[in-house]
Image (cartoon, grey):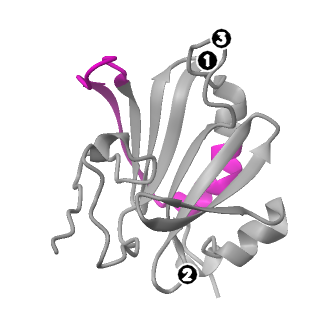
Amino acid sequence: MTLEANSPAQFTAQTSSTLRQKYGQPTSETYDGEATEIYKVRPDIKVTVRYTKRGDVCSMFIGPVSKTTNGEPPLLKSQPLDDVIDELVPEHQRGTHIMDTFLNITCLPNYDCYGTQKDYKRLLIIHNGSIDAYRYASIEWKHRKCQTPASTKRAKYPERNPTANRGGLSIEKTTQ
């Protein structure tokens, strides 16, 4: 039997269990009324994870552990950030590479929504910032819907939500 390069049988979906095996016990928190798991994957890098109702990972937000350094937001270097992304979703799990895009979006008040987007068959990877000066990266699976509690309103500013869809394709709103 021969497997195609993009065959689902070639990889295992990330789940809470597989992440716990690799990174240990997460810090569970609530962000915008949703349960999330946060893993410290490097001394200075954490990953915030959301899941589908089935328990598969649907989005990951990769950012610095600390919130500020001398009053400035900490920035991530390119190589460690790319290493973490490759560890979380190796290239063979992403599907066919479709296109890379530069992002130049105006986000007030800091005008800090520029970066790049890598579009693959199964997911989007967004780097926010520039070489050796990234604020965060996010990974969004295209065909996995994150569970959202029905009683929870979405954030007033979804573009600042570290677990919201940053791919520019859609921002879901929950109505009461």
In screen coordinates, is 92 left or right of 139? right
Q: How far apart are marks 3 and 1 (CA)?
A: 18 Å
Mark 2 vs mark 1: give the one in front.
2
Residue 87 belongs to magenta span: yes
Rendered location of residue 47, percent (x, y): 63, 50
Mark 3 vs mark 1: give the one in front.
3
The residue that label 2 is drawn on is 55
Tell me which residue sits at (45%, 30%) in the image.
128
Compare marks 2 and 1 and give the one earlier in the sequence.
2
Q: Distance between the residues labelled 2 and 3?
A: 38 Å
Tell me which residue sits at (15%, 71%) in the image.
175
Rendered location of residue 21, percent (x, y): 83, 70
Q: Residue reaching furthest left?
A: 175
Image height of 93 relative to 16, above or below: above
The quadrant the N terminus occupies is bottom right
Q: Is mark 2 on a helix, strand or loop?
A: loop
Q: What kind of residue is marked 1?
A: Asp
* The one of 12 and 104 positioned closer to us in this rendering: 104
Label 2 Cα neighbours within 10 Å, binned few <14 / some 14-19 / many ≥20: some
Residue 14 belongs to magenta span: no
Q: What kind of residue is marked 3?
A: Asn
Image height of 96 relative to 61, above or below: below
Q: Is mark 1 on a helix, strand or loop?
A: loop
Residue 109, image quadrant: top left
Rendered location of residue 154, percent (x, y): 28, 59
The residue that label 1 is drawn on is 132
Label 3 Cα neighbours within 10 Å, binned few <14 / some 14-19 / many ≥20: few
The residue that label 3 is drawn on is 70
Image height of 5 relative to 64, above or below: below
Q: What kind of residue is marked 2?
A: Gly
Tell me which residue sits at (75%, 49%) in the image.
40
Instruction: Write down the region rendered in magenta.
Output: 84-113
